[in-house]
Image (cartoon, helix red, strand yellow):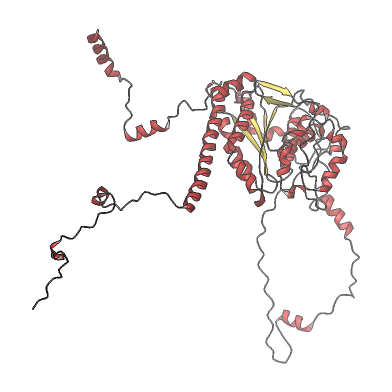
Amino acid sequence: MADKPPVEAGGASTDALPAARPKAAGNPVFRMMGLPNFRFKLPSRNWLIFLSITGSFTTAVLYDRYHKKRAQQRWCNLVSHIAQEPLPTTQMPRKITIFLSAPPGDSIRAAREHFHEYVKPVLAAAAMDWDVIEGRREGDVRAGLAEKIRKKRRKDGEKPRVSTEGETPEENEDLVQQLRTTTGVKDWEGVQGDLVLGRHTWKEYIRGLHEGWLGPLDPPPDTSPNSAHGKEAQSLATEQPPVADDASPTPDPLQTGAASGTTADSGVPPIEAPKPEPQKEEKPKQPIQIAPYISTSDYPSATLAPSTPNVLPPTTVLPLPHLLGFLNTPIRIYRFLNRRHLADETGREVAALVLASHVRAWDPRSDSTGSGPLSDNEALLEERRSNKAAIQGRWEPESVLEGEERDWHKVAWKRYQGEPERVWRNNMVIEPRIGERMRRFDLAGNEEDKARQDGGKDPAAKGYWENIKEMVGWEVDKTVKGWEHGLVAEESDERN
């Protein structure tokens, strides 16, 4: 007999009551669409810390990038009218000379990237032409500028005291210039200008400027080991008496037998001679750097070149902040998040060079004595403190970008035995005859005010929402086509 269902106290069985349906969790709309159940809630403590840090850093980067582009566009708009000015077909455009070299302890790639990111946009907006003198190591810019000035002096009629055998005249070297002269193409008659990038390049620029105009045209005697002068001195220093013939060692019979392919009667097989090792391919050596034609101590007694102009080409010196080292990471992050100020300062100086509306002379004496110690080398600091003449009453170019020397790598301050002249480490020396001829570009007040009033927006560029509307297809072209002008005229007549 089947068991009866249990009966509760009220007399009703449990099977008679309908079972309660489980309550559906989540939004039924999402459930019908097959989407998972989204439960909106605050993230945990760790997620809040992560999102706040990453969000703050991303916001700071985007903010700096936005204002950096606006600062660059502000100065590009100021000089963009120069690109629209017509140029005669018989005249070359204005060409400036750019000097850049590898920072201390790094390659030249850092200087090139800085030029392409901060300097080139303004020059390209004005359609400027430029020539670059690069230095991969210390002293290359100095040698390049000095040789350029000496070449100009030879073209102006100066002749060296000692003529080099097999030397071709300068006119045969520059065939392009000869072709332009024969076709009637003239060079730019206005101001050209030089642009120097970084404190280390500025030191080499000043040294090469003095060497070119104060130094002789004859090269100094070459004392390198590869030269004839150096080989003769090296042979005299290492000369030894010849060895007598009877002092020669007795040949070993085993070696002679091995060389002839025979051995003694013992029946031992002949010993094979060792095969010569294949010669390794020698890598091309770096070109030897040209030694200075004149030292800084000979400046007062040197004769100024007769072809020296009364006013040298104006210059513009741009900062090149370059800091290395893991311990300097906080400073490097701060500079990375404030690149908009560097772009604004660099754009202003480049715009002054491009416009060339105001040129002034460097102050003959500067009251600034630097901003504290420049390095951790105590011997160098003691040497600079003892040289009171170099600290009191310095020229203005000596204090330009002086704070960058604190960021230089320690390689720039090391001393090596038998090292050549160290332009970066030595103090800058300016001869008054050269210093009074130097000029620099400056931006006029009205031009700077005009640039500051500009919002820094490209008039030809579209905004964010305009690009989205055009991409989606919401942008309505309100320009009237040529065949629609008649319909517009008829509608206006009907309304009237």
In the image: residue 275, left or right of residue 371: left
Q: Is residue 407 left or right of residue 294?
A: left
Q: Above or below — where is 52 with respect to 238?
A: above
Q: Position of residue 463 (x, y in %)?
A: 43, 30
- Give the image location of residue 394, x and y in percent: 82, 31
Q: Residue furthest front?
A: 9
Q: Give the x, y percent position of residue 117.
A: 57, 38
- The answer to whether residue 146 is visible is yes
Residue found at x 27% / y 15%: 488
Q: Residue furthest bottom?
A: 266
Where is 61 relative to 19, above or below? Answer: above
Q: Nearer the viewer, residue 52 or 91?
A: 52
Report x, y in % for residue 350. Answer: 62, 29
Whether residue 126 is visible to the viewer of this picture, yes or no, is no
- Quadrant for the C terminus in the image: top left
Q: Is residue 228 above or below residue 86?
A: below
In this view, the residue in front, 36 or 83, is 36
Number of numbered discs overlaid on the protein picture: 0
**The image quarter in which residue 23 lies:** bottom left
| 32 sits left or right of 59 in the view | left
Quarter placement of the N terminus: bottom left
Front-most of residues 395 and 101? 395
Most extreme residue toward the top is 496
Say above or below: 215 vs 286: above
